[in-house]
Image: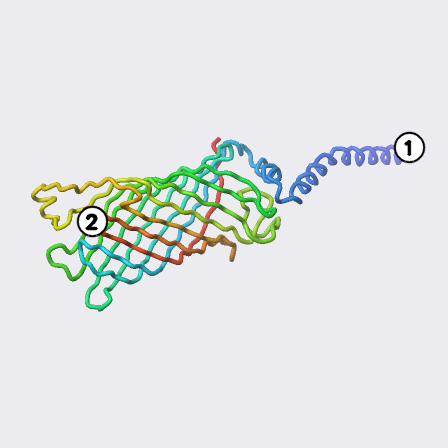
Amino acid sequence: MQICKIIILWLAHSLNTAAITGSPAMTGSSGRLAHCQEPYNYSSQESCNNNVQGAHRSQLKTNAMMIGVGYTNMLDTYLSPEKYRGADIRFLSHTRREKDSTIWINQLQHEGNIAFADNRSGNGGEMAGGYTFRYSLLRKWETSLWRHPLRLFVGGTAALNAGFAYNTRNGNNPANARLSLNIEPTVGFDYPLGRPRHTRGIAFNPGACAHFPVILHYEASAPLMGVMFSPNYGQSYYEIFNRGNYDHNCVPTTFGSTPSFRQMLTVDFRLTHVTWRFGYLGTIEQTNVNSLKTHTYTHSLMIGIVKRFRTVKL
């Protein structure tokens, strides 16, 4: 009997100790759950982000790889006074890098395109292509709108472009080169749509508790000033490069001589365990220098995949 009584007292003591030791963990778990019950509170997102070791030294990276097809309208009076209309195909790599400890976003874009177009009579064609690299430094603000988080950003972009246009009807001057560097004010916002959940959907910030069905992105930019290459009116490339006849071919530009505008509206959504991005990209590119005019109007539908991850510096 004494042995049984000792065993019962030992078991009771062990169970009591386990309950006391486990209660803080249970309280912590319920505390985290209580934080996640309010997905619109930014402290909730911070508490979830703090679960990542060394979050204050981490970097958030979002990369979207997209392809697009659309309509283009081109004019280059150095090659022809005619307007050419056709199809445009483009590729865009869009990357954002940001840290939890700063209010700045570093954004990089690599964009390439090729276009094929015909004149209105159908007896002549034009082909154009180009590559553009954009680096943006953006200042972000985070607030709320209709109980959803809203991120606004404003900053500047340096855009370097190189391209060409080729006309199949010209003999003496069949092609024109394009090279420019512009400084562009840039604005945009990110905003989630739909009812938030804790499991399915897309987190507005990596590590946040709330997951939304759709996240809306918008950004727009316009060149303020820059410099570009352009032959002068009636000047051939033979004169420029073989004979070295410089004639105001490196031209400073402003918004007045290059009235252009670029905007992109996209949505992110989850499908088959992949984050997709779908949307619209519109560009209005115009120049009026050296008595020559060019324009390229493009409207494209874009689709691609998005990868979001966090890197931690040890």
Which residue is under mark 2?
177
Question: Which residue type carries mark 2?
Answer: Ala
Percent across and percent down for residue 196 are 60, 50
Q: How is the model colour-coded? A: rainbow
* Secondary structure under the numbered disc 1 in the rendered image: helix
**Relative height, residue 51 to residue 88 (above, below):** above
Look at 32% across and 56% down and name the residue there: 297
Query: Quadrant where the N terminus lies?
Result: top right
Percent across and percent down for residue 246 are 12, 41
Snapshot quadrant of residue 136:
top left
> How many tags in the picture?
2
Which residue is under mark 1?
2
* Secondary structure under the numbered disc 2 in the rendered image: strand
Structural crowding at the residue carrying mark 1, measured as other residues with C-alpha within 10 Å and reported as few (<14), some (14–19) or many (≥20) = few
- Side of 25 relative to 142 (left or right): right
Question: Which residue type carries mark 1?
Answer: Gln
Percent across and percent down for residue 49 are 57, 38
Look at 50% across and 46% down and name the residue there: 190
Look at 57% across and 43% down and name the residue there: 144
Among numbered discs 2 and 1, the one appearing first in the sequence: 1
- Side of 227 relative to 275 (left or right): left
Nearest the camera: 91 or 117?
117
Nearest the camera: 258 or 297?
258
Of the two numbered discs 2 and 1 in the rendering, the one whose residue sits closer to the viewer: 2
Nearest the camera: 141 or 274?
141
